[in-house]
């Protein structure tokens, strides 16, 4: 029995050396594999976010104009419109800057004379909306149409062609 204990003691240091070498190889392998796995995950996350999630499902590429130039009219700008949504109780607000496009200089001049009325019409329309209506991205085109229709009803010199949101911040 004493001989068996001696044999076990002699085998034991060899086995522990092999285990230490195995651990050091495994430890070194971890230092190599972990950064590689993290890089692969980062690349996959980048691909998913920028190629799948950020594209709007209704996104349509704008066709190139046939003439080669985009015709842009003149703009009348209405800046710093701040309103509280109807359901917010004063806790939320919308900050909006709007650009109204037209090719009619008389309409731009008329809008300058009616700026107070234009601001009031926009504010009145916006304060009837709820926070949910402002949060929905798809509802913004409807909101633009409502504002444009409301303003065009009262303009005498012509009608605005398009409306753009220069700033749209909901807090």
Image (cartoon, grey):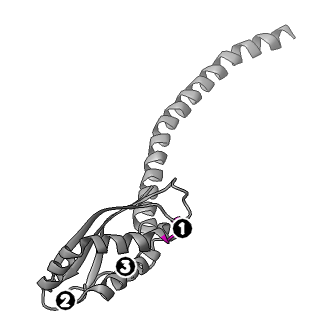
Residue 123 coordinates in the image, percent (x, y): 39, 69
Q: Name the dominant secondary structure of the magenta segment.
A: loop
Q: Using the image as rendered, state which of residue 92 and residue 135 is in the foreground.
A: 92
**Closer to the camera: disc 1 or disc 3?**
3
Q: Using the image, determine if residue 4 lies above or below residue 82.
A: above
Q: Using the image as rendered, state which of residue 114 and residue 137 is in the foreground.
A: 114
Q: Using the image as rendered, state which of residue 167 and residue 154 is in the foreground.
A: 154
Image quarter (top left, top right, bottom left or bottom right) of the C terminus = bottom left
Residue 91 coordinates in the image, percent (x, y): 52, 53
Residue 33 coordinates in the image, percent (x, y): 49, 42
Kindly identify which residue carries mark 2: 157
Examine the structure image and report whether residue 131 is included in the region drawn in magenta: yes
Q: Is residue 36 visible?
A: yes
**In the rendered structure, which disc, 1 or 3, sits on the residue that comes first in sequence?**
1
Going by the image, does 127 lie left or right of 151?
Answer: right
Other residues around mark 3 within 10 Å, as few (<14) / some (14–19) / many (≥20): some
Q: In the image, which residues are magenta?
A: 128-132
Kindly identify which residue carries mark 3: 147
Residue 132 circle label? 1
Q: Secondary structure at mark 3?
A: helix
Residue 83 circle label? none
Residue 58 coordinates in the image, percent (x, y): 43, 80
Q: Are marks 1 and 3 in contact (CB under 8 Å)?
A: no
Going by the image, does 106 lie left or right of 43?
Answer: left
Q: Secondary structure at mark 1?
A: helix
C-alpha span from label 1 to label 3: 18 Å
Other residues around mark 1 within 10 Å, as few (<14) / some (14–19) / many (≥20): few
Examine the structure image and report whether residue 59 is included in the region drawn in magenta: no
**Closer to the camera: disc 3 or disc 2?**
2
**In the rendered structure, which disc, 3 or 2, sits on the residue that comes first in sequence?**
3
């Amino acid at each position: 029995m004493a001989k068996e204990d001696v044999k076990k003691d002699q085998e034991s240091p060899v086995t522990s050396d092999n285990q230490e070498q195995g651990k050091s190889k495994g430890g070194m392998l971890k230092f190599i594999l972990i950064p590689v796995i993290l890089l692969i995950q980062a690349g996959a996350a980048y691909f998913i976010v920028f190629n799948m999630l950020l594209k709007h499902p209704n996104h349509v590429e704008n066709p190139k104009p046939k003439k080669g130039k985009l015709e842009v009219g003149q703009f009348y700008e209405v800046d710093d419109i701040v309103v509280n949504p109807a359901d917010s109780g004063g806790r939320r607000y919308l900050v909006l800057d709007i650009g109204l496009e037209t090719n009619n200089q008389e309409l731009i001049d008329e809008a300058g004379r009616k700026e107070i009325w234009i601001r009031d019409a926009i504010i009145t329309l916006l304060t009837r909306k709820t926070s949910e209506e402002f949060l929905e991205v798809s509802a913004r085109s409807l909101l633009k149409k409502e504002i444009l229709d409301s303003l065009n009803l009262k303009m005498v010199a012509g009608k605005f062609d398009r409306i753009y949101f220069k700033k749209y911040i909901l807090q």
